[in-house]
Amino acid sequence: MTFRTTVILGLCLGTALACAGSHDLSPQRALPAYTQECAACHTAYPPALLPAESWQRVMTHLGTHYGSDASLDATQVQAITQWLQSQAGTYKKVRNAPPQDRITLSDWFVREHREVRPELWRHSSVRSPAQCSACHTQAENGRFGERELRLPTPAR
Amino acid sequence: MHAHKRLAPMLLVLLIASPCLAADTQPAAQLERFAVQAGRSGNAELGRQFFINKHGGEWACASCHGEPPTQAGRHARTGKSLLPLAPAFNPKSFTDQARVDKWFRRNCQDVVGRECQAAEKADVLAWLISLKS
């Protein structure tokens, strides 16, 4: 293998790895309490999809959590809050808190789903935009890339 | 000395595995606990009615857990899949007392708008335990 081929191969591999990782939003190790408590009812949303101030509000109002009582004991609330704060999004697209602190009302979320037809949102396997894994097959692992996208068929 | 060497890895395995073995109770023991608190035994038919009916709110227990709750349920709002609630169809169901109390406390708020009474819990559990494959 010549030096030039090695460099080219190295560059290709580097690019492939960088792209493969670009949609991996979940922390390397999720807090077990987060997975156990929060993901019992919904997708284990990657903490980086909301700013720290949104997580703070969400965690202080667990008794009235988007229409459900999601209250936890104080020790768990503190541990999960601390972890969410440390993992919260700080990059430009999530810097501002979305309306109602809902990921699905973030500007970027609405923009990236603008081509989704209304009947798809109503599909029996989707029902709610909170149900990421209905289309994003690797959502629970924090991966939302096009390659992992499977739209439900046919529309029902 | 050699025994200690063999023991250490076994203890390590137990330590690592112990969080997975959270089971500290059984469904029948939970039914008994609520029956004692209520001062009467659980009534499966009352439990079935309590479970499938709404109580002035948007949801019944069955809205998420299904009717009968012998298969995977689905969260009424998020669409998240839930393990079957009836113990005969889910060996982990009602095997962790803290979880039993936590879910009754929260879900009763969502469905009934208050904490459930011991008699109501005994009835529901009596019905759930009666569901067999």
Image (tube, rainbow, N blue to C red):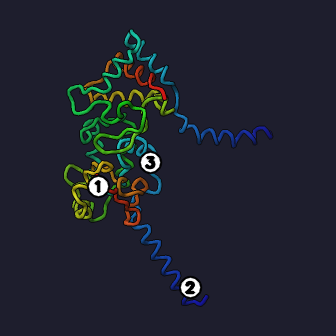
Q: Amino acid at mark 1?
A: Ala
Determine the image quadrant of residue B101.
top left
| Residue at which label 1 appears | A155
| Residue at which label 3 appears | A31
Residue A58 or B32: which is nearer the viewer? B32
Measure how far apart labels 2 and 3 are at the Cα level: 40 Å
- Frontmost of labels 2 and 3 is 2
In the structure shown, which secondary structural element does the residue marked by tag 2 occupy? helix
Measure how far apart labels 1 and 2 are at the Cα level: 48 Å
| Residue at which label 2 appears | A6
Determine the image quadrant of residue A114.
bottom left
- Frontmost of labels 3 and 1 is 1
- Say if mark 3 contacts mark 1, CB within 8 Å: no
Q: Residues within 10 Å of mark 3 (few under 14, many from 20)?
A: few
Ranked by sequence position, the earlier of labels 2 and 3 is: 2
Q: Residues within 10 Å of mark 1 (few under 14, many from 20)?
A: few
Determine the image quadrant of residue A25.
bottom left
User: How many numbered marks appear?
Assistant: 3
Q: Residue at x 72, y 38 (%)?
A: B7
- Frontmost of labels 1 and 2 is 1
Instruction: Provide the chain ID for the residue under circle 3.
Output: A
